Amino acid sequence: MVSLFFITLLGAMVPGASFVITVKNSLCGSRYCGIMTAVGLSLGMALHAAYLLPGLYWFQHHSTHILTLITWLGAIYLCYFGYRCLQAQPREANGIHLNHQHITPTQSFLSGFMTDAFNPKIIIFILALLSQYVGDNLSPQAQLSYGLMLVLVQLGWFSIVAFLFSSGKLKAWLYQYAHWIERASGLLLIMLSVKLVVESV
């Protein structure tokens, strides 16, 4: 269980779409927006864990079509979100509190949830990780334990990211470059969407 925890944590720490979304929402929204993004990401993880853990054996042998569908849906979403980020405009240098109106906590939550819900790498990660450490026949208690661990690691790590990137001094310094960070985030999200499509072909 301990080794599974650390591997799950390392998996969450690898920079990807979840990291980009959390940083973007924390910087362009507020700390609360960043936390709500982390909550959305963790519930996206919970969604996958809820159906993967009970049917681990089945999904290991019949997941091809599901992965393809989620890959394309995820690529479309990331591309759309990336395109919106590319349209970011400069903000007033002295208007650091105005950025709280740029994205709401609800939007942050939804962007986090959609990012993980349509991320096929989450499915691959869960299947690959659990197939190495647990058997095909899990008790309900074991399913709940592993599922909670996946969700809490996701929530904990990205809450830390949100806290760091919404801290006063760092945010004040980054705010003047916020539109460039948003545009870079948008470009990265579009690149990730293209990478998903290429890898699925």
Image (spheres, rainbow, N blue to C red):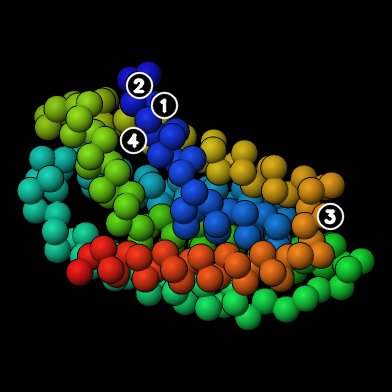
Identify the residue under disc 3.
172
Badge 3 or badge 1: first in the primary sequence: 1
Badge 2 or badge 4: first in the primary sequence: 2
Point out residue 15 in the picture as x, y percentages from the top left corner: 49, 49
Point out residue 91 in the picture as x, y percentages from the top left corner: 81, 73
Badge 3 or badge 2: first in the primary sequence: 2
Distance from Cα at disc 4 to Cα at disc 3: 37 Å
Q: Is residue 95 left or right of residue 70?
A: right
Above or below, 3 relative to 180: above
Identify the residue under disc 2.
3
Distance from Cα at disc 2 to Cα at disc 4: 15 Å
Secondary structure under tag 4 reads: helix
The residue at the far right in this view is 94
Badge 4 or badge 3: first in the primary sequence: 4
Amino acid type at image mark 2: Ser
Q: Is residue 199 left or right of residue 192?
A: left
The reply to whether callout 2 and callout 1 are in contact (CB within 8 Å) is yes
Identify the residue under disc 4.
147
On the rendered image, what quadrant is the N terminus found in? top left
Distance from Cα at disc 2 to Cα at disc 1: 5 Å
Residue 189, visible in the rendered structure: yes
Identify the residue under disc 1.
6
Instruction: Please name the residue shown 83% across and 55% down the image.
Output: 173
Q: Is residue 86 left or right of residue 120?
A: right
Q: Considering depth in this image, is 140 or 102 the residue closer to the camera?
A: 102
